[in-house]
Image (cartoon, rainbow, N blue to C red):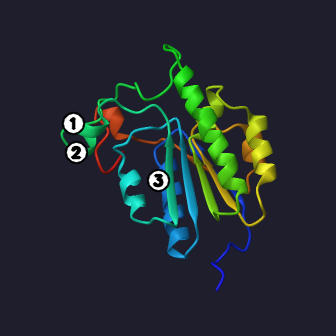
Amino acid sequence: MPRPRLEMGLVQVYTGNSKGKTTAALGQCLRAVGHGFYVCFIQFLKGGAYTGELYSTQRLYPNFQFRQYGVTCPYSALIRQGEEKCRGCGDCFPSKDKDNSEHERMTRIAFQAAEKAVCSGEYDLVVLDEINQAIHVGFLTVEEVLDLLDKKPPLVEVILTGRNAREAIMERADLVTEMVLRKHPYQKGIASRRGVEY
């Protein structure tokens, strides 16, 4: 018996300046796997080997492939073991104040993996987590991403997440959700919490 396939594959964008974009994408993945669909979740600019989603999704293998393409945190092992907390140092994210060549190199590798995953026919849902931010910082162009979406097979759903989604990306999408910041624990000085923010 052939495996189930989506009736139709659309393009979704989760953007905005508040928490919840990756979380929403993960929820969509969980729903898809529950129906027997195959998912590939590709994280751009993230290499924190301590995030909870990295470990929970391993339990859904082979239906759920989770791949990270980012510079890792030097404290990953200790954070994963619960002996350290995320310090919010920002070393694992690109910034204007430092050499970003390794971040850019990893983004290029991630984009090649994204093209392969979207076009392979192996997956029903492909999440390109933080790809909007990779465009925003100049590691990818809008044209490259639109070209990838044009190559998407009709039965493959693609979700693009990250702040600063470009207008052309949102126009190309079938669904756009914007997370709007109204209140955040960071504003009270509450740092990222294990099991909630990572």
Residues tagged 1 and 2 counted as in contact (Cβ below 8 A): yes
- Residue 184 position within the rendered picture, expressed as x and y whole percent measured from the top left: 38, 40
Q: Please name whichever residue, 131 or 108, is drawn nearer the observer in this view of the structure.
A: 108
Nearest-to-viewer mark from 3 and 2: 2
**Pointer 3 residue:** 23
138 above or below 40?
above
Q: Which residue shows up at 46% across the image and 45% down it?
A: 19
Residue placed furthest toward the left: 83
**Pointer 2 residue:** 81
Choose top left, top right, bottom left or bottom right for residue 40.
bottom right
Q: Residues within 10 Å of mark 1 (few under 14, many from 20)?
A: few
Q: Secondary structure at mark 2?
A: loop
Q: Residues within 10 Å of mark 3 (few under 14, many from 20)?
A: some
On-image quarter of the N terminus: bottom right
42 above or below 96?
below
Q: Which residue shows up at 80% across the image and 43% down it?
A: 147
Q: Which residue shows up at 49% across the image and 35% down it?
A: 70
